[in-house]
Amino acid sequence: MNSIRRKFLKSTALFSATVAAIGTGLLVPGRAVAAYLENAFAAKDISGALMAATGSDTYTESADIKLKAPDIAENGAVVPITVSSTLPNVESITILAKNNPLPLTSTYRLQNGAEPFISTRIKLGKTSDIIAVVKSNGQLFSATKEVKVTIGGCGG
Amino acid sequence: MATIKIRAKAKNGITTVKTLVSHPMETGLRKNKKTGKKIPAHHVTEVNAEYNGNTVMTANWGPGISKNPYLSFKFKGGSAGERIKISWVDNMGKGDSLEAVIK
């Protein structure tokens, strides 16, 4: 912290918050979009990750989301996950693994006629709840399923 | 060598795309057992799918996606003979893209 920046920080509350964010490397000008996702992927809890990825951490359980995952994963390094939904106007699908060191595995933005369907393979460090969060009409809905892991796929 | 494999199929007005990317997807949390040093993170951060010049799906991935990632998604429209484009970038700035014909 040098004296010039000190003066900047005092100028206005909003401005000082922005400067502080740049100072700590959280926000790099011109890379704001990428930066907010970096925060999302660095978050160590569900609400922090969701907040950063989707702008909200309140979600309601919905029967209109289908989350397909194995009951028991023999190999945590490769766990097939399929999320589909019948909710209208789905903007994004986010897949979280509650007990992973970094719970946010991936987030998908859907547009221009994309169907609310994503299938991928994720890593699980240990037995964990999988939470699929679907953003529909600006609101978050979720489906949860526990996957038991016999061999972990993170760390080693 | 191409790092992407794409299979796209149109049926009943919906195109299903399946894609495989060959990538190590290192988490940055693993240690080299011999040296005890951490293996630096090296994973795909973004996958983009384009149809008719429009982005239909953007995937943002963390290190929690499996090695040699598999991804499948669907979109409305698309017919046999049309092309889709998949591209990815990783946290080390590498990337690749590939076009495929819808079957």
Image (cartoon, coloured by chain):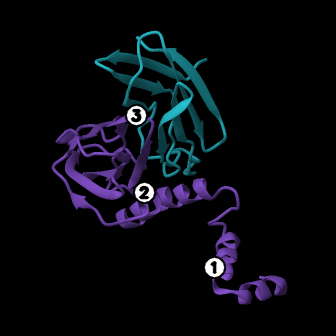
For disc 2, the neighbor class at 10 Å (few under 14, some 14 to 19, many from 20) is many
The chain under label 2 reads A
CA gap between label 3 and label 1 equals 38 Å
In this view, the residue in front, B27 or B36, is B27
Mark 1 or mark 2, whichever is nearer to me:
1
Q: Quadrant of the rendered structure where residue A16 is?
A: bottom right
Residue B94 screen position, x and y as percent: 65, 35
Mark 2 or mark 3, whichever is nearer to me:
3
- Chain drawn purple, letter? A
In this view, the residue in front, B91 or B30, is B91
Total tally of numbered discs in the picture:
3
> Considering only order in the chain, which callout, 1 or 3, is on the residue closer to the N terminus?
1
- On the same chain, marks 3 and 1? The answer is yes
- Which mark identifies residue A113? 3
In the image, taking residue B61 as reference, residue A81 lies left or right, namely: left
For disc 3, the neighbor class at 10 Å (few under 14, some 14 to 19, many from 20) is some
In the image, taking residue A3 as reference, residue B69 lies left or right, namely: left
Q: Is residue A98 visible?
A: no
CA gap between label 2 and label 3 equals 31 Å
- Which mark identifies residue A17? 1
Q: Is residue B96 visible?
A: yes
- Chain drawn cyan, letter? B
- Which mark identifies residue A102? 2
| Mark 1 secondary-structure assignment | helix
In this view, the residue in front, B9 or B18, is B9
In this view, the residue in front, B26 or B58, is B58
Amino acid type, label 3: Gly
> Considering only order in the chain, which callout, 2 or 1, is on the residue closer to the N terminus?
1
- On the same chain, marks 1 and 2? The answer is yes
Residue in view at x 57 percent, y 42 percent: B42
CA gap between label 1 and label 2 equals 26 Å
